[in-house]
Image (spheres, rainbow, N blue to C red):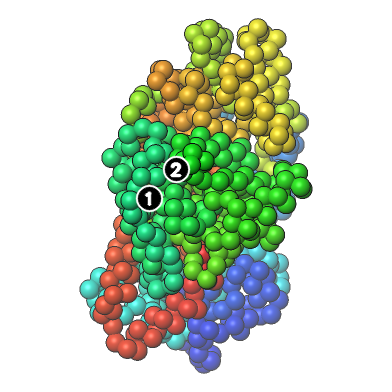
Amino acid sequence: MKTQPASPRTSQPPRETQTFATDVKFVKGVGERIATALRERGVQTVEDLLYHLPFRYEDRLHPRHLRELKPGEMASVIGEVRGAALLRTKKMPIFEVTVGQGLDTVKCLWFRGTYLQGKFKAGQMVALYGKVEASSSRAGAFKMIQPQFEFLPDASATGEDAEFAGLEVGRIVPVYESLGGTTAWGAKLGSKWLRRVLWDLLAEVKDAPETLPLALRERLKLPGRMGALREVHFPSEGTRLEDLTYARTPALRRLVFEELFYLELGLELKRRRMREREGIAFQTGTDVREALKQILPFHPTAAQKRVLGEIVADMQHPQPMRRLLQGDVGSGKTIVALEAAIVAMENGYQAALMAPTEILATQHYLSARKVLQKATKEDGNRRYRITLLTGSLEPAEKKAARGKIYRGETDLVIGTHALLEEKVDFDRLGLIVVDEQHRFGVQQRFRLMKKSGAAEPDVLVMTATPIPRTLALTMYGDLDVSILDELPPGRTPIVTRRVEEQRSAEVWDFVRKQIQAGRQAYVVYPLIEGTNDDQPELDFAHDPPPEEEAAPKKGSRKKSSDLFKAKLKSATQMYEELSAGPLRGLHLGLLHGRLDAAEKEIVMARFQRGEIDVLLSTTVIEVGVDVPNATVMVIEHAERFGLAQMHQLRGRVGRGSAKSYCILLTGVMVSQEADQRLDAMVRSQNGFELAEIDLEQRGPGEFFGTRQSGLPEFRVASLLRDREILELAKREAASFAVNAEATEEEKETVRTQLKQHWQRHYGLVEA
């Protein structure tokens, strides 16, 4: 089985030297037609192709023997095709292949595998990679479901197949994400094609233009760029598979550091440029201090005092403030934001608070009125004028609100995306507060900033979703960070319990007892109405063809969702069932995203006044809703919710002095990952700890439930794997920005690299 690793061909005359800037169509084996497909995947130049790195490696130097396999593990196996057949079952066709090593065999199954007919022939050598499961039909035997596969050249291969045989076996082999499209003869642009193209290309391309200064590379013991690329694509003999998997080789560490260094350097320079812009130097004299004292509803925590001090110090500087305020659920971010608004308003400027939903904007508006009404002028009139601007207002109301904002007849404007409309102009905007920033794109923050006058307003970005440090360093690396890590006095820990659906009657009895004691409750569902009865019992519809080596998204984890789709309850369905059943006689309310803003406001107002005992809702109440009398949060199908979402929902209770409870009702099928999430919820109430677990499970791209537009796209780095290198890159970038240990030529190279690659590869904008 073992063959000698391939080496560059020397029998042919050398082709014209390729450079990193060469158009990909001129690469041997590509051409115009394939280049068109590659450009659709962002591969335009030789450099782009070289940076299409393996997403994993297979050990084909020491492949696993079938006798060594263990159920549950991911394994690479090389064997001979012994037989193949298409099995037609009642539910779907299943393609079955038997692969053997001597007397031992393993069954490979592909659901809906009709497309594989004719591809497997007896006697072919094939490399398999997939999850090993115990066979249900024969003791001691194994099967692999939906494994990725690749046919290997046999001993009788001639021509190019023989020439490149050393790239396929007898070494650690790189596996790539498919680039889509096919060659002229119908082969996929997958791993086998990429290995051959890259092997030739690496022999032809001249040394890569070095992007890191020599002194920096020598101090950190990083190899050169070209050598690193060769090693990553075709690891040298003796390289350990484990080191490649976890990016511990010098070559991978160098490429990861390079990418993160330029990201952090760009963010550092953005921060420095911001400090050079003309901002507003707010004064904080006696009037401001007295105004702040008037509105405080309680003695602030030490964390609130510290954070307000950081914000006010920023606001006093003539440069624009750009600060991220992180705080766990119930830590008092809103009161801190209102205090910052008072500083701006007492200086004669307007403040704007933008929230992602009308419910949250309305909640902020009501809270602001309640808090700020304590602040009065000497004549007894209210000190601050507050305006609400949302998309659902009547045209006449919108026009009136916009007029007040433009004429300076309002001091604090609270709204949704409606604040971004072109017709909205401010008289003298001094402070912008963006709540739940991850629900807005960075471009939206930028548009609101541009509604100020000549001087740029200060910007305070808030989030109640604690952000792991690795994400904060990339998404908000150009912002200063303040953290509220202390709860106000009187907030008691929330008792959290997991309960299986079979015991739901006990849960409803408990809810009824809480209502009888004068309390209120929330019940949250994943759906508004209907169920997923129309879903097939087994769902493999989105599985990629196995020969296309589909890679997981950068930095994300492939979800191990259950094959069986459980029926989900919905808010509207359960409103009817609970009203007529377990909660009969209680006052129930229903809240979801399809209600218009006026209906939502009516429902929430009734709940706040105590006219509704139990509010059935979807996740529209995830943030911002504040009802101190609510002591119970029931989350149905809790296994379907992310950690951050469950933690936010739990934060809707425990806002008063009474003991509060969060009950996680689970369905029949709970995956291993969901089980870990639920256990973490029971174990911890620390949002930052839960955020780290959530990041590990779901990856950066899905951390907030939707793809975050402000998150960079990395070619090499992984925020889950490369945390230590990210911290190192941040320190080195900050040092380089102050005192670069580099020649003038190297500094110019760094500037050019940053300018050319910042927007394209990191997807960040000036906002």
- Identity of the residue drawn at 43% across and 23% down: 656
* Residue nearest the observer in this picture, 682 or 91: 682
For disc 2, the marked residue is: 378
How far separated are the C-alphas under marks 2 and 1? Answer: 15 Å
Q: Position of residue 366 (x, y in %)?
A: 56, 36
Mark in the foreground, 2 or 1: 2
Q: Secondary structure at mark 2?
A: loop
Residue 568 appears anywhere in the view = no
At 51% from the left edge and 11% from the top edge, which residue is drawn? 518
- Relative image position of residue 46 (x, y in whole percent): 53, 79
Q: Nearer the viewer, residue 47 or 317?
A: 317
Instruction: Decide which of tag 2 and tag 1 comes sooner along the chain.
Output: 1
Residue contact at pointers 2 and 1, CB within 8 angstroms: no
Most extreme residue toward the left is 219
Q: Is residue 619 visible?
A: yes
Give the image location of residue 600, x and y in percent: 67, 32
Picture quadrant where residue 271 is located: bottom left
Type of the residue with mark 1: Val
Q: Nearest the camera: 49 or 616?
A: 616
**Residue reaching furthest front?**
379
Rendered image: mark on residue 288 = 1
Q: Position of residue 709 (x, y in %)?
A: 56, 57
User: Label 1: few (<14), some or many (≥20) within 10 Å?
Assistant: some
Q: Amino acid at mark 2?
A: Glu
Q: Residues within 10 Å of mark 2 (few under 14, many from 20)?
A: few
| Element on which disc 1 rests | helix
* 209 up-or-down from 147: above or below: below
Left or right: 448 in relation to 102: right
